[in-house]
Amino acid sequence: MSIDYLRNGGLMMKIILTCITICCGLFLCAASPVKKTFEWATDLKYPFLPKQKMVFINGVVKNTEATALPDIEAKYSNRVRVDNLIFTLPGELCETMSACYKADLNGDKVPDYVFVSIKVWNGRFAGQSDVGIFVSGPGKTYAFKAFETRHLEAEVINGKVMLVKYAYSDDEETYIRQVYTFRSDGNLHLYKAEKFAWQ
């Protein structure tokens, strides 16, 4: 056999072994469990917590020279109209990084409104949000409650819609999962708290 033939054969063998290695790696990745991720707080899809249309009042476009998302040509305002009601938030919302949801949180048959504003959109803390809740109280008034959350969820327990917030625990790997309910006067109440880790 010639030297060229041996060289070509060796090169071909390296290519085949490389292909086998890549295929095995892809198979192992596909076979291993994928770590579940949270939904962004602006993309929640619960039938009991429907997303609402927001109209920004006197909204201002701040990033007129931006060349990329998330807020290029987006309006900012701290006053929004939802269901013909005007809500004033303590901080500004951005059109593309906020959402509003509606549910009866305290069981008084009057809709309550949950406003979410994502303030971190990249890196390890992507999705970290401020949550502001307007809960109906006596005399057709709304009490305002707020908290910060790493991620946001909702669930129905004993017929009541509850909000679920997450925060990193001290080990910065597991989460603390807190479930909140609302009393008839609009006050926030911790229903339960537990350690949580993705399996």
Image: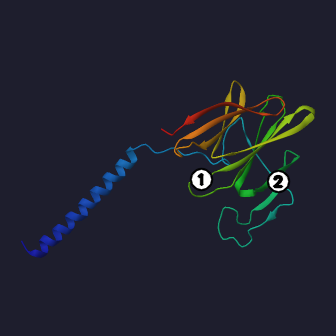
Quarter of the rendering containing residue 5: bottom left
Question: Circle 2 is placed at which residue position?
Answer: 55
- Residue 34 position within the rendered picture, expressed as x and y whole percent measured from the top left: 46, 45
Quick check: 196 left or right of 183? left
Query: What amino acid does circle 2 point to?
Result: Val
Residue 3 image position (x, y, % from top left): 10, 75
Residue in the image at 34% along x and 53% along y? 25
Q: Residue at x 36, y 52 (%)?
A: 26
For image coordinates 71% across by 25% down, the residue present is 159
- Residue 117: x percent and y percent? 72, 51
Q: Earlier in the sequence, mark 2 or mark 1?
A: 2
- Residue 125: mark in rendering: 1
- Residue 43 or residue 37, whichever sits in front: 37
Residue occupying the point 66% across, 71% down: 67
Can you give x and y, in whole percent of width and height, for residue 192 in the image? 65, 30
Query: Quarter holding the N terminus?
Result: bottom left
Q: Amino acid at mark 1?
A: Phe
Q: Secondary structure at mark 1?
A: loop
Residue 75 against residue 48 in the figure, above or below:
below
Tag shown at residue 28:
none
Cβ atoms at labels 2 and 1 below 8 Å apart: no
6 shown above or below 163: below
For this orientation, the residue located farthest to the right is 139
Separation of residues labelled 2 and 1 (CA atoms): 28 Å
Is 3 positioned to the left or the right of 68 in the image?
Answer: left
Quadrant assignment, res 160: top right
User: Which residue extends farthest left?
Assistant: 1
Look at the numbered disc 2 and give the secondary structure of its residue: strand
Q: Name the colour scheme.
A: rainbow
Image-based side of 160 in relation to 27, left or right: right
How many C-alpha atoms fall within 10 Å of the one at disc 2: few (<14), some, or many (≥20)?
A: some
Is residue 168 shown left or right of residue 102? left
